Amino acid sequence: MGKQARAIVDLSLKDLVKDLNKAYADEWLAFYLYWYMAQTVSGRAYEDIAEFLNKIAKEELEHATELADLIIKLGDVPTANPMELEKNANAPYLLPPKNSADINRIIRIVAEAEAGAIEVYNKIAKKTFGKDNVTYQLVTHILSEEVNHEEIFENLLER
Ligand SMILES: [Fe+2]
Ligand SMILES: [Fe+2]
């Protein structure tokens, strides 16, 4: 991002990058959790659950990529050390269930993670609305995908 592009950001760049880096950490933790549960899930309908988990894991990784790109455009860098991802995240890592066939627990874990993500992106969207339109556009795009993820898993729970 050039000088003028940064100059029109009507917010503290330092705070904004901090928020984006926290969301970046959340995305990596969500990707790892969903990917891990997709590999390990067993029991009734495990193939369907694995497919849903892999689909949304892929989107979480895309979110991490989009956030990294924006952080770099804003003149900073995403978290370099994976050991710092959990420390920087907005929420602690949710451990997968001990019983890999506990599909209801898996669904609840995803629903909880998605609810947290929705809250985080809604907060950043409110903060950047009319103040940093580029970030606003990205976070509302991510927010709409998190809303879809919550929907997919809430529907599984009701079935
Ligand atoms: Fe995400
Ligand atoms: Fe998500």
Image (cartoon, rainbow, N blue to C red):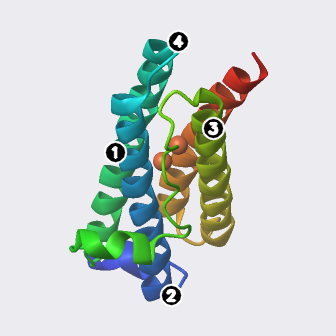
| Residue type of the residue flagged with mark 1 | Leu
Classify 42 as above or below 116. above
Query: Observer-nearest residue: 103 or 88?
Result: 103
For label 4, the residue is 45
For label 1, the residue is 61
Q: Where is residue 124, by image quadrant?
A: bottom right
The CA span between labels 2 and 1 is: 27 Å
Q: Nearer the viewer, mark 4 or mark 1?
A: 4
Query: Percent x, y for residue 90?
Result: 54, 70
Q: Quadrant of the N terminus?
A: bottom left
Q: Earlier in the sequence, mark 2 or mark 1?
A: 2
| Residue type of the residue flagged with mark 2 | Ser
The CA span between labels 3 and 1 is: 23 Å
Q: Is residue 16 visible?
A: yes
Query: Observer-nearest residue: 154 or 66?
Result: 154
For label 2, the residue is 12
What's the residue at 49%, 85% (across, down)?
15
Asked whether the residues under the numbered discs 3 and 1 touch, taking CB atoms below 8 Å apart as contact, a structural biologist would say no
Asked whether the residues under the numbered discs 2 and 1 touch, taking CB atoms below 8 Å apart as contact, a structural biologist would say no
For label 3, the residue is 105
Classify 110 as above or below 6. above
Query: Percent x, y for residue 82?
Result: 25, 68
Q: Nearer the viewer, mark 3 or mark 1?
A: 3
Res 8 label: none
